[in-house]
Image (spheres, helix red, strand yellow):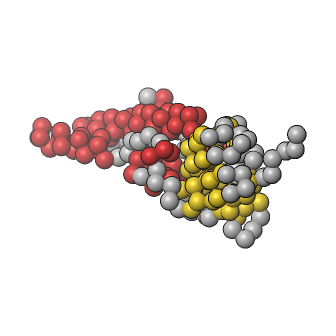
Amino acid sequence: MMKPIAFWLLMYLLLASCTSTYYSLQPQTLEMNDHTFRFPDRMVEVSIEYDVLKSPGSSTYARMEKKHKVSLVALQIQNNGSQPILLPGDFNFHIRHGDMIKPLSLEDAMSALIDPVTNESSGVVEVETRGSLGLILGAGKAVNQTKRVVSHVRFSEDMLEYYLENKSVSEGNFLTGFLALPVPPGTRVDLLLREPASK
């Protein structure tokens, strides 16, 4: 029989150390110092930050980013010009010295970055180990699945709020948010601002 102190210590270790919890990504808190693109003719400046999923609570999404060869980047667009900027449509993204790429839609980005929760999330967890250890392992798996679901909800909320799909930056304003690009994480891109449509 397991002693009570050993039981609770083992339970704490199993529950606390398994799945990390996602911490909210807020693009306005990022340094945005990887690269800045300046478009003086239009008085627009765009700063980009790569590897935004490097924080400890984002490791699950960083693994999915690598697995699906998708790069989540943060952008800050400062529009001091006389016309609104539409995102992502007013920009052309190019792989450095390569082909043009199109940012993923929000739906495709979330499909690529969110690892589906298995059917263990239904609350039924099968554990073959008998006794106290089996109970602890079963509880640990249930807690891990719950933490994953909560993390996915938080990540989805951040993507819905900050994803730069169908957004506009009006004259004299700035906007900060995310885009997912169909390139391996860390791949540097060039950014071109399209000419405004003639009236």
One can see residue 116 in this view: yes
Q: Residue at x 77, y 60 (%)?
A: 100
Is residue 71 or residue 139 the one in the foreground?
Answer: 71
Residue farthest to the right?
Answer: 199
Is residue 172 or residue 153 the one in the foreground?
Answer: 172
Q: Residue at x 40, y 36 (%)?
A: 147
Q: Quadrant of residue 95?
A: bottom right
Is residue 90 or residue 171 the one in the foreground?
Answer: 171
78 vs 148, left or right, is: right
Q: Which residue is drawn at 61% across and 53% down?
A: 46
Is residue 179 or residue 40 the one in the foreground?
Answer: 40
One can see residue 107 in this view: no
85 vs 30, left or right, is: right
Q: Quadrant of residue 151?
A: top left
Residue farthest to the bottom?
Answer: 97
Quarter of the rendering occupied by the C terminus? top right
Number of marks drawn: 0
Quarter of the rendering occupied by the N terminus? top left
Return the x and y of residue 2 as percentages of the image width and height: 15, 41
Q: Quadrant of residue 108?
A: top right
135 vs 73, left or right, is: left
Return the x and y of residue 128 as percentages of the image width and height: 37, 41
Return the x and y of residue 68 as percentages of the image width and height: 62, 54
Residue farthest to the top?
Answer: 123
Q: Which residue is drawn at 64% across and 46% down?
A: 80
